[in-house]
């Protein structure tokens, strides 16, 4: 069965890669329309299998289908092709040059490991699938064990919609089972892979991808603790607003979000205590899977056992008679010294509604080195500043955060990732196995490679590189004879 | 010593990354000027240590220095930053969005393993160094054992020029020794690496990079046999021109080029024989190193021992009293059947003046499957067609070549790689360990990562993302309220 899916994807590849932008874009929109039409069925299955709230899932479905439409527009606009045309130039400063034309093309069949925590937006028809299909790559999704019936249903919807839109058989497939997922990654016909999940599983798969006789790019989005840094002024300014926003961000979706703030660094926790303790009143929320529950329980035990931990909101995690896990929020306070002393255990991601308030004391000048040492690889880092704070004084920290995370927020909270042209959902390891974005239109770049044509007759060129530019895509031309003060050079947009 | 270089590179990183485009561009031009000024000294050392001809080395020096000037212009133009600005939009179809701005930033200190065969253009101050420095990454070059004195001299020139241009200490360093090179790759302060050389060494290093506690991107340019396909009409049209061009491309620089055509596929070799045998008259050329000589001798023995091999020009490879290797060209003819029968041994790269003429018979319709099966990963593939040949009939082969190689040539020969905006010097494994270009301005992309800023005050934004755009770089803006037929969307250039 997986073998058939891979065989079909390999057969579909040249045909799907050759589809015109409007054909492929329309097919993505057709998938979106079909998912919207099946909304009630899809939402009901997702609720049953994940325990996530209906409102959250309705929002996620909208995100999922609009994301497909967004990528349809990316395909048609064609900037992602990065089409470049060098006109021949016998006088070119680097040496005489022929006619050379370069374009981005799909890498080939992509294996996408679905996530548990976004059963729509990071699963069968989610962002990775949309980005890979948009680039012209057939996609095989390895379904997540946490929502098999939903995976089966959405897989059928996607496959039917693509077939009706005229895409070749094999453009899209779903496979089930962990062993099957690993076997597929080793198959030579798979040319790229992506993954969203735990650091341990992600690293195991990344190592397999790298060790293949023919290694392939593996884009894993693994663990992140998303530190939030609060300046003394910001703390003074609005302690209640801070505490409320923090609790909402930590506990939403039961803390099962890759951008959940795991550490809140404040001069001292005192002004926040009263509001933070209201987290005690939050009702228990079902956890995604038995594995999530067990993993979260372990992490929570570890954090609470760290020397110096003050338990502010104890919370709980329990398994009911049906085997479902339920959690209420846990908030702990530690001094910076205690965190540093226990950094090998405390600093890992806790996937659930737990966060640690770290008291850093009176001197925010220590924060840049703290950020560099304790938080070297994250999806996000957030900075809460007061009004009119000195940019020079804080720019050192901002500079460190831009080197250690993919997204730097000023105010607000990192949960709730926007799907846009400028979004970066990536970051240094272990946030990702290779630092590229998994969200937003730039995510398409993970599944492309460059190819160039030298002295090709127009009739042999791909449409994006032809002089008559039938697809109307942006082309960067380097005319002959262009020169500059330094005498080399490239064309300009 | 290597440890000091790495420590200095790590210290230099934030400072060098923050240099303005005009400062960094001027520093690259200063390096170019200093190398040009030292041209005679540099060329003399290169001749002594590599045995390459003076004219070749003079051309290579020009390429090296113009390449640095080219990257200076890339830095100043700023398109490589891919600056994107999403204006906040409460009505955005995918969901309300904040102000998000994304830019490419350097990955950090880069370790560059120099090549043996381009002692200037792919060594200390070569293309990889230029691309990494242009992106704002400090660079440490692991010098190649084949030209240590040249490496020392050019390393000094580069370091002095960067220092005089005001770049921070540690921006550039050189280290010597294989063990030191491996140790550096394992150092956590190194954040990216690139390599040009053999498949065995490149794969060993790629595996080390992938197995680090924190894996890093490793861009290896390894083995390629660069097949050339000749149509029956092209063979009939100009057999003498074909044979002459082929011999020149195979024997130039003693065949020690990564784009040397290793296989020439023709209907039959008969029309070429007379001209090909003139290769007997080519004088012996010194080989680069003892390792090159030994490796080439092994490969030559293996190819000549393949069942069915007809030796057209026997050639030789010998070691003189000083231990220097000398080679004359070897040309062999095999039927397609013989190549397929011996494909596990014959199809590897032979780094030296050897090439195999493969007779494929009367039906060019078999070439697409031959290309896919025998030549799955190459830097280049070349197609010689007659005038007015049917694009439809040959497009299947062109399509396969675009999937199995980085550059597809129509006529001409793959040696002599142009350094331009549209060049692709990459290709599926084993051509490269990850398919990205090592030549041309797109090579800068290997050493960049994206970072985005959410709701950042203007004063905290990097200059490339500010509304006043002080560097004058291209910015892609997604205005609020933009909508389209499909309701999502992105900005346009």
Image (cartoon, coloured by chain):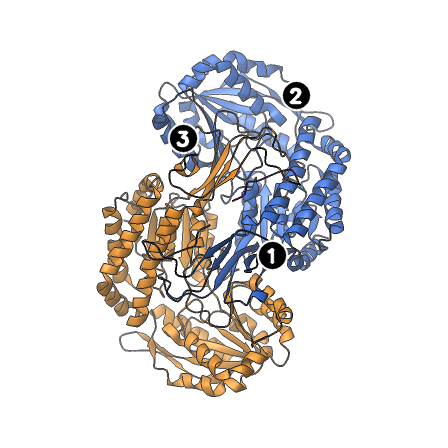
Chain colours: A orange, B blue
- Which chain is mark 1 on? B
**Contact check, label 2 and label 3, Cβ < 8 Å:** no
Give the letter of the chain under mark 3. Answer: A
The image quarter containing residue B203 is top right
In three-dimensional space, the C-alpha distance between marks 1 and 3, rounded to whole angstroms, equals 42 Å
Q: Which residue is mark 1?
A: B470
In the image, A73 versus A207, the foreground residue is: A73
The residue that mark 3 highlights is A460
Label 1 crowding class (10 Å Cα cut-off): few <14, some 14-19, many 20+?
A: few
Q: Closer to the camera, B241 or A319?
A: B241
Front tag of 1 and 3: 1
Q: Secondary structure at mark 2?
A: loop
Crowd tier of the residue under label 3, counting other residues whose Cα lies within 10 Å: few below 14, some 14–19, many 20 or above: some
Circle 1 or circle 2, nearest the eye: 1
Q: Is residue A139 above or below residue A482?
A: below
**Of marks 1 and 2, which one's residue comes earlier in the chain?**
2
Residue picked out by circle 2: B284
Range drawn in magenta? A487-493
Place of residue A305 in the rendered image (x, y in percent of width and height, measured from the top left): 50, 80
């Amino acid at each position: 069965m997986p073998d058939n899916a891979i065989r079909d994807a390999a057969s579909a590849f040249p045909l799907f890669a050759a589809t015109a932008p409007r054909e492929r874009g329309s097919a993505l929109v057709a998938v979106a329309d079909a998912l919207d039409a099946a909304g009630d069925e899809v939402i009901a299955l997702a609720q049953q299998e994940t325990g996530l709230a209906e409102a959250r899932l309705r929002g996620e479905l909208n995100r999922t289908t609009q994301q497909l439409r967004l990528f349809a527009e990316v395909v048609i606009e064609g900037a992602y092709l990065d089409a470049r045309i060098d006109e021949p130039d016998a006088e070119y400063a680097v040496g005489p040059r022929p006619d050379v034309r370069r374009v981005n093309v799909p890498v080939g069949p992509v294996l996408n490991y679905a996530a548990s925590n976004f059963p729509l937006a990071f699963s069968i028809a989610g962002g990775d699938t949309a980005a890979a299909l948009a680039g012209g790559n057939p996609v095989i999704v390895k379904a997540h064990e946490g929502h098999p019936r939903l995976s089966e249903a959405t897989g059928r919807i996607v496959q039917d919609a693509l077939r009706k839109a005229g895409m070749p058989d094999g453009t899209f497939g779903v496979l089930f089972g962990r062993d099957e997922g690993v076997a597929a990654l080793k198959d030579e016909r798979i040319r790229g892979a992506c993954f969203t999940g735990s650091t341990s599983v992600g690293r195991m798969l990344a190592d397999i991808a790298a060790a293949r006789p023919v290694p392939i790019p593996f884009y894993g989005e693994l663990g992140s603790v998303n530190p939030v840094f609060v300046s003394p002024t910001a703390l003074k300014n609005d302690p209640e607003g801070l505490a409320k926003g923090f609790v909402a961000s930590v506990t939403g979706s039961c803390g099962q979000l890759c951008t959940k703030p795991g550490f809140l660094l404040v001069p001292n926790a005192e002004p926040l205590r009263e509001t933070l303790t209201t987290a005690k009143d939050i009702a228990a929320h079902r956890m995604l899977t038995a594995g999530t529950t067990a993993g979260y329980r372990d992490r929570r035990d570890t954090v609470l056992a760290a020397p110096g931990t003050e338990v502010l909101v104890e919370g709980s995690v329990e398994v009911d008679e049906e085997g479902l896990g339920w959690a209420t929020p846990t908030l702990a306070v530690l001094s910076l010294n205690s965190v540093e002393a226990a950094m090998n255990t405390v600093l890992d991601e806790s996937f659930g509604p737990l966060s640690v308030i770290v008291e850093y004391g009176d001197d925010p000048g220590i924060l840049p080195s703290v950020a560099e040492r304790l938080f070297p690889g994250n999806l996000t880092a957030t900075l809460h500043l007061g009004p009119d704070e000195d940019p020079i004084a804080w720019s050192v920290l901002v500079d460190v955060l831009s080197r250690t995370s993919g997204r730097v927020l000023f105010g607000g909270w990192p949960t709730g990732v926007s799907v846009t042209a400028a979004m970066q959902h990536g970051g240094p390891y272990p946030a990702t196995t290779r630092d590229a974005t998994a969200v937003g239109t730039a995510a398409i770049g993970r599944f492309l490679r460059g190819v160039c044509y030298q002295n090709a007759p127009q009739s042999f060129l791909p449409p994006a590189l032809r002089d008559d530019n039938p697809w109307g895509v942006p082309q960067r031309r380097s005319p002959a004879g262009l020169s500059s003060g330094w005498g080399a050079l490239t064309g300009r947009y």
